[in-house]
């Protein structure tokens, strides 16, 4: 619901902005109610569950990830592969900060601060999302080939 508060502040900066939510989890109804309470329901897009969220990253200008506590997030890694700037809470582990696209704010910062930073990140990557970030992510060890090689190495060590 904090995301919606940030989105409401963001819409004051960019009235054409949209908020995309994938899935219809336990909080979907709360999200719809909160959006109505904040007057941003017209900017809300709720898409049903998807097997592969990766194609949706290319439709986004920025990825917002506030979290009270979080482990390593594959969504954060996938977003960087898609050259998508990320604004997350400082609770996200540093291991997910693979590229210069990953940025953090404290949950205690104001929703206005979050909205302004998100806008800055989105506007400063427009036209520059050329896909080279996927190479950086792969070099950091987050690729199918690297993961397969690591699994094989572990299995071979188990045999020895």
Image: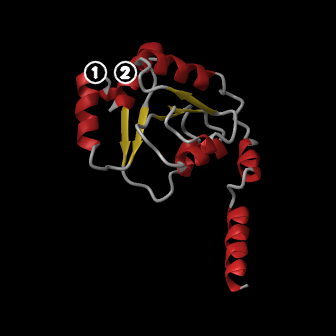
Q: Nearer the viewer, residue 19 or 155?
A: 155
Left or right: 73 with respect to 25?
Answer: right
Helix, strand or loop at disc 2? helix
What percent of the width, then of the height, locates residue 5?
Answer: 35, 24
The image quarter in which residue 86 lies: top right
Question: How crowded is the residue under tag 2: few (<14 C-alpha within 10 Å), some, or many (20+)?
Answer: many
Task: Tell me which colouring the rendered structure shows.
Answer: secondary structure
Question: How crowded is the residue under tag 1: few (<14 C-alpha within 10 Å), some, or many (20+)?
Answer: few
Residue at horizontal 76 percent and vertical 48 percent from the top: 135
- Is 13 situated above or below 65? above
Q: Quadrant of the C terminus?
A: bottom right
The image quarter in which residue 110 lies: top left
Q: In this view, which residue lies farthest toward the front?
A: 160
Q: In this rendering, which labeled residue sits more in front, label 1 or label 2?
A: 2
Mark 2 and mark 1 in contact (Cβ < 8 Å)? Answer: yes
- Is 97 situated above or below 160? above
What percent of the width, then of the height, locates residue 2?
Answer: 36, 29
Helix, strand or loop at disc 1? loop
Residue identified by numbered label 2: 8
Residue identified by numbered label 1: 39
What percent of the width, then of the height, locates residue 100?
Answer: 69, 33
Left or right: 127 with respect to 58?
Answer: right
Res 65 label: none
Q: Nearer the viewer, residue 111 or 34?
A: 111
């Amino acid at each position: 619901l904090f995301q919606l508060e940030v989105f409401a502040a963001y819409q004051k900066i960019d009235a054409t902005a949209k908020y995309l939510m994938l899935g219809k989890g336990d909080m979907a109804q709360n999200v719809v109610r909160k959006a109505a309470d904040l007057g941003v329901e017209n900017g809300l897009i709720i898409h049903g569950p998807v097997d592969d969220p990766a194609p949706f990253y290319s439709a986004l200008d920025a990825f917002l990830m506030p979290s009270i506590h979080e482990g390593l997030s594959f969504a954060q890694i996938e977003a960087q592969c898609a050259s998508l700037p990320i604004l997350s809470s400082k609770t996200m582990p540093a291991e997910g900060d693979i590229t210069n696209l990953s940025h953090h704010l404290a949950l205690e910062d104001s929703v206005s601060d979050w909205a302004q930073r998100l806008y800055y990140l989105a506007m400063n990557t427009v036209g520059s999302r050329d896909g080279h970030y996927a190479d950086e992510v792969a070099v950091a060890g987050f690729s199918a080939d690297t993961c397969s090689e690591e699994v094989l190495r572990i299995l071979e060590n188990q045999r020895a």
